[in-house]
Amino acid sequence: MGLRCVVLSDHGRVRERNEDAAAAFLAEPGAGWGFDAALVVCDGVGGAAKGEVASATAVAELERALRAPAEKPLAERLVRAIADADAAVRSYAQRELGGARMGTTLVAGIVAERSLTVAHAGDSRAYLLRHDAMTPITHDHSVVAEQVRAGLISDDDARVHPLRGRITRAVGLGGAEAQPEVSAVALEAGDVVLLCSDGLHGAVEDAEILAMVGDDLDASARRRGQRDRRAVRDRMSGTLVETSGDRRGTAHAIEKELVIGRGADADIVVKDARASRKHLRVWPEEGAFFVEDLNTTNGSVLNGAPLQGSRRLANGDELFVAGLTLVFRASEETMVFSTRSTAGTGTLTFLFSDLRGFTALVEREGDAAAARHVAEYGALVREAIARARGAEIETEGYSFFVTFPTAGEALRCAIAVQRRARQATTGHPERPIEVGIGLHAGEPETDGKQLIGASVNLAARLCAQAGTGEILVSEVVRGLVRTSMIAPLQERTGLVLKGIDDPPRVYAVDWS
């Protein structure tokens, strides 16, 4: 069967750099590769560090691994090559970026005689084009795609969903988050195999892609006018979410300049005498978002440090204005904390985490130092949540409410938080990060806006009773993790769980 490979890539009209990388190579006579051709497409994940480096590194490592002679089955070789690519990306991040998260989607295919073996992680896709029909070989690893497959939303809803760019797997994240999915397809003469990033499939309808085969796909995508071949996704949107006070959870879309202050005419009113009438402004500009303190007496705090001049906002940035905490959220494709929908998933494990000693710290060192303390605590909690595939449901001040699909993931997250807190405290013992955590599992109820019910309440009560550096779990969680040997558990007696009529046995986790 004759083969012809074509590689097309373009960074688009707006982005300064191309975060896509691609390669295709035909077998060399006598090379002993065991296949006829290999193809790979990677798309560096936006919102993470060095996306263009991640994609280029993954492609280079995959090609190196596949060019080496080997006799193992193709699927096994492909999975091993992707594992090598994942390790190479993580090694670069550790060596050059101090361990910052970086990642890339990946889809790769190997053609051997009349068969195609495909492996993918993320939302880059493989299609089979045959007899005027276009059939997807892969399905996206993303929050929205999972909701579509679960029947929670329609395909039309998915196209405009605000979380449509949130992927759940990527090379460079390690562990289950980097695990590829493998599939195989029998090929016929005349078949066309298309591998592409969301820059194509997110900008061009399948019917149009099919019509363009044999034409210049990349030029047609550019004619659609999308940025970086992403017609919708790169039209960035930004939101400020109040995470403290009686309006916590309220979101403010940044479609124009927003003024934050004590004045009645402010877009976001701060009911605190320490706030100036016009204290802070946030505004959009050419696809980015910026913040500026308006020369106030008491100042503003960004991520725990005094805000000087104007600064560009990044996803997850925290603003502190006279007692009000605001979190900036961007809708561009990003690796985010919430990787799974909580709706309709049945049993979940709930984690509540609370920072101890904060009031004393404020009185001892003042608002600015306390804000930096909270920011450091929040960063280490969110890193643990992301690594354990948790979903951050609500954050109020320095308290986190997170859900996990399994008790094991929740417990590993809790242990990671305590260990990171201990490590941070060793660095500055005068400002210890002291955390109490509670875990329980059950089926939550919902009022349409938030998760509620007895199972949620019990997890919160366990957190309230947990001492500094302690993780308390319910008997249900103990039963779910008992055989996993994650950490020893010791029954904890003498606790008073307020509002719980029939309190269960409670266990403390030996995470040391």
Image (cartoon, rainbow, N blue to C red):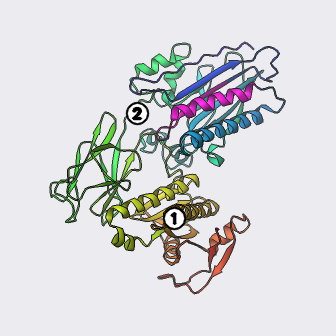
Q: Is residue 283 visible?
A: yes
Determine which of the numbered discs, if any, sits on residue 425 in the image.
Answer: 1
Q: Secondary structure at mark 1?
A: helix
Q: Which one is in front, 100 or 220?
A: 100
Q: Secondary structure at mark 2?
A: loop
Residue 58 drawn in magenta:
yes
Q: Which one is in front, 133 or 442?
A: 442
- Left-right relation of 479 to 12: right
Give the quadrant of residue 181.
Answer: top right
- Left-right relation of 313 to 230: left
* Image coords of residue 3 (percent x, y): 70, 14
Image quarter (top left, top right, bottom left or bottom right) of the N terminus: top right
* Magenta stretch in the rendered image: 39-67
- The kind of residue tagged 2 is Val
Q: What is the spatial separation of the Cα atoms under label 2 and label 1, in whole angstroms?
A: 44 Å
Residue at horizontal 20%, vertical 57%?
A: 297
Residue 356 drawn in magenta:
no
Name the residue beneath numbered marker 2: 232
Q: Which one is in front, 189 or 267?
A: 267
Q: Is residue 343 visible?
A: no
How many numbered circles are shown? 2
- The kind of residue tagged 1 is Thr
Residue at horizontal 31%, vertical 66%?
A: 245
- Left-right relation of 59 to 449: right
Q: Is residue 41 above or below residue 393?
A: above
Give the quadrant of residue 416.
Answer: bottom right
